[in-house]
Amino acid sequence: MRSLIMGMASTVLAFGLMGCTNPSASQAQTPNPQVVQTETSPAKQNTDKTATDKDVKAAPANREKSAQKSIVVYYSRTGENYSVGNITVGNTAKVAQEIAKQTGADMYEIKPVKPYPAEYKKCTEVAQQEKEDNARPQIATTVEHFEQYSTVYLGYPNWWGDMPMIVYTFIESQNFDGKTVIPFVTHEGSGLSGTPQKLRKALPKATVTDGIAITGSTAQNKPDEVTKKVSELIKQAPKD
Ligand SMILES: Cc1cc2nc3c(=O)[nH]c(=O)nc-3n(C[C@H](O)[C@H](O)[C@H](O)COP(=O)(O)O)c2cc1C
């Protein structure tokens, strides 16, 4: 298994690591994390951008509050993990929880209609195939009133030197225009792998910050380090 992950890490070395922060910006809100998602049947799921925008516009308007609101959106997998054994809370989820704790942001978990295999090697194979196919796996959950958020902390594990394809499904199904996107990734050696640049390309009307990378074992087992890293990350958010 070690050789598999080393192979992945070398595959993505060319992307280089990103981890700069913007110390001039700061954000601190009262911790009040709320989960804002509903389960959606696959039949009802909507990944079509136009139709989704329509849904968003039809939602009760909350625009007065939009200047300040933040949300933590993340995908994270449980089950057999490369470095931290069998986990019931994913590595990226751990970081997401800390961001919500420090900022008071709402939380939304991207859940796939078809869960990824709990077995690590099988999951790497499925993920590799999805990447080769440039797939857009369906999401089982719907974020509520995405239009009200001006800052989106977007978290994902590094999969094959990229974001999991389901994260592309999410970003393509929502309107990010004018929002600030703050990426955070957990990984086992590949860091951010240039994913902020990929987000900038996919979301040209959003401001995507440089983000932060945290190893899976740190995320899972070193809460103090996570707290410190997250307190740096949230400085990338725009000032109120
Ligand atoms: C399908 C798959 C592909 C992965 N590819 C990479 C990779 O290319 N580089 C890397 O550093 N880690 C890779 N990893 C390790 C994960 O990024 C790491 O374990 C991460 O912390 C998992 O986060 P999660 O628990 O939130 O899902 C991969 C893991 C999986 C399951």
Image: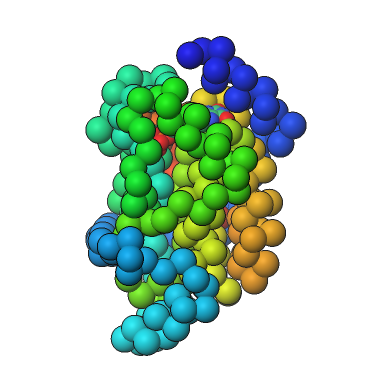
Q: Residue 212 location in percent, x, y?
A: 55, 42
In the picture, measured across the screen, residue 79 lies left or right of residue 123, that is left
Residue 117 quadrant = top left
Q: Position of residue 144 (x, y in %)?
A: 32, 71
Rendered residue at 55%/17% (across/down): 4
Q: Residue at x 33, y 61 (%)?
A: 42
Of 115 and 142, which appears nearest the observer? 115
Q: Position of residue 27 (x, y in %)?
A: 45, 60
Q: What residue appears at the point 33 percent right and 30 percent down from the top-left corner?
A: 118
In-front residue for pair 86/207: 86
Image quadrant assignment for residue 138 = bottom left
Judge whether residue 93 can be spotted in this image: no
Compared to residue 112, the image places residue 161 above or below, namely above
Q: How many marks?
A: 0
Colouring scheme, one of rainbow, by chain, secondary structure, one colour:
rainbow
**Which x, y percent locates residue 173?**
49, 67
Image position of 112 (left or right of 17): left
- Residue 128 figure quarter: top right
Work out whether 142 lies above or below 85.
below
Decide which of 46, 106 is in the foreground and name it.
46
Residue visible at 35% across and 25% down? 119
Question: For the view shown, which residue lies furthest in the right direction?
Answer: 14
Residue toward you, 238 or 38 = 38
Q: Is residue 38 visible?
A: yes
Would you say 184 lies left or right of 64 here?
right
